[in-house]
Image (spheres, rainbow, N blue to C red):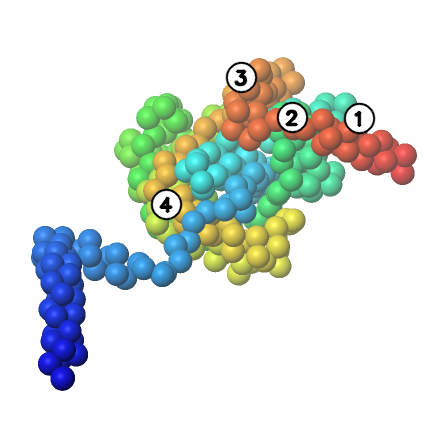
């Protein structure tokens, strides 16, 4: 009487083993052949992976707020692994409703917001974020990031090196040393801007792993002295963005233009316009209208 159910039970059990054992055996062979891959898949299963979003696409005018300010046009795009820095001399000509002026004049009249707005209109690029910090703050950020080896070839000629007391073609700089070199270098504005680009590129490339935490941390520590429209959350986003870009290849260069010795002004040329619009995008018609209305409002006050 009971032989029927018992027999059915053992038959079902054996059939189950016949199905399960090959699967388990195959998994065991897979783990033996690819142990690291299997462990990684098990560890990562169900764990969210942080990836860059639209917040990590930043266009920023960074200013070193010295007696003669220095300007960096920065493009960070984590999703496309783009990290671009364009250095602009303080004598760079920008257009305003009152007529042409320099970035230094725009900054002196109404701070980094005015400089960023006029540069945006001149290059016809969207540029809504700005940040000005003292040279000491930027030097501290570089100090926290680490040291950098700077090759002076193409940055300074022999006469310029001799004037600075430099006998070697390669320098190892920390943040303080870089700031001192820029302060003591009595160079034409375009040459000084080129040297600044070389220094920023060296620090950004050689300290990519530490750059985000160094820059973000120092800026937050000195947030009370910054002139910026970046919030505290934005500064954390900036740190995250630089972290995402740790595998990117940072590029720093002088934004193309023509130096006019007679007027001591630097005029951006067509190449600069095309390069900026390719990297930053083109200003929309709506933004142009809003900018024009804002300038009219300023003039009427």
Real-space Cα separation, disc 4 to disc 1, in angstroms: 42 Å
Residue marked by disc 3: 271
Who comes first in sequence, dot 3 or dot 2?
A: 2
Outermost residue to the right = 300
The C terminus - image quarter: top right
Contact, mark 1 vs mark 2 (Cβ under 8 Å): no
Count residues near mark 3 (Cα–Cα under 10 Å), then give few for <14, some for 14-19, many for 20+.
Answer: few
- Is residue 187 visible from the viewing direction of this image? no
Q: Secondary structure at mark 1?
A: loop
Give the side of residue 278 with respect to residue 43, left or right.
Answer: right
- Give the mark toward the camera: 3 or 2: 2
Q: Label 4, on which residue?
A: 246
Front-most of 89 and 116?
A: 116
Name the N-terminal-most of marks 4 and 2: 2
- Residue visible at 65% across and 28% down in the picture: 283
Q: What's the mark number on residue 124? A: 2
Can you tell which quarter of the image residue 154 is in? top left
Is 31 displayed left or right of 157 in the figure? Answer: left
Q: Tell me the mark number nearer the camera, choosing from 3 and 1.
A: 3
Write down the residue under mark 1: 98
């Amino acid at each position: 009487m009971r032989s029927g159910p018992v027999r059915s039970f053992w038959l079902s059990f054996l059939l189950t083993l016949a199905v399960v054992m090959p699967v388990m055996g195959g998994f065991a062979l897979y783990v033996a052949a690819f142990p690291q891959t299997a462990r990684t898949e098990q560890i990562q299963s169900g764990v969210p992976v942080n990836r860059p979003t639209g917040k990590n696409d930043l266009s920023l005018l960074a200013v070193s707020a010295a007696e003669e300010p220095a300007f960096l046009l920065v493009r960070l795009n984590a999703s496309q692994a783009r990290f671009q820095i364009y250095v602009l001399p303080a004598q760079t000509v920008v257009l305003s409703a009152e007529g042409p002026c320099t970035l230094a004049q725009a900054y002196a009249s109404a701070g980094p917001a005015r400089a960023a707005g006029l540069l945006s209109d001149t290059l016809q690029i969207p540029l809504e974020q700005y940040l000005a910090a003292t040279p000491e703050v930027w030097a501290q950020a570089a100090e926290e990031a680490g040291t950098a080896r700077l090759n002076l070839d193409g940055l300074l000629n022999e006469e310029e090196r001799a004037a600075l007391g430099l006998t070697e073609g390669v320098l190892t700089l920390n943040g303080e040393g870089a700031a001192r070199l820029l302060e003591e270098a009595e160079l034409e504005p375009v040459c000084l801007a080129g040297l600044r680009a070389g220094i920023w590129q060296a620090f950004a490339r050689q300290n990519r792993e530490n750059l985000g935490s160094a820059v973000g941390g120092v800026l937050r520590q000195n947030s009370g002295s910054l002139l910026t429209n970046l919030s505290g959350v934005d500064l954390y986003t900036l740190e995250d963005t630089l972290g995402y870009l740790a595998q990117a290849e940072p590029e720093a260069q002088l934004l193309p233009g023509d130096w006019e010795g007679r007027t001591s002004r630097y005029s951006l040329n067509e190449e600069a316009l095309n390069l900026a619009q390719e990297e930053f995008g083109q200003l929309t018609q709506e933004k142009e209208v809003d900018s024009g209305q804002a300038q009219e409002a300023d003039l009427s006050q």
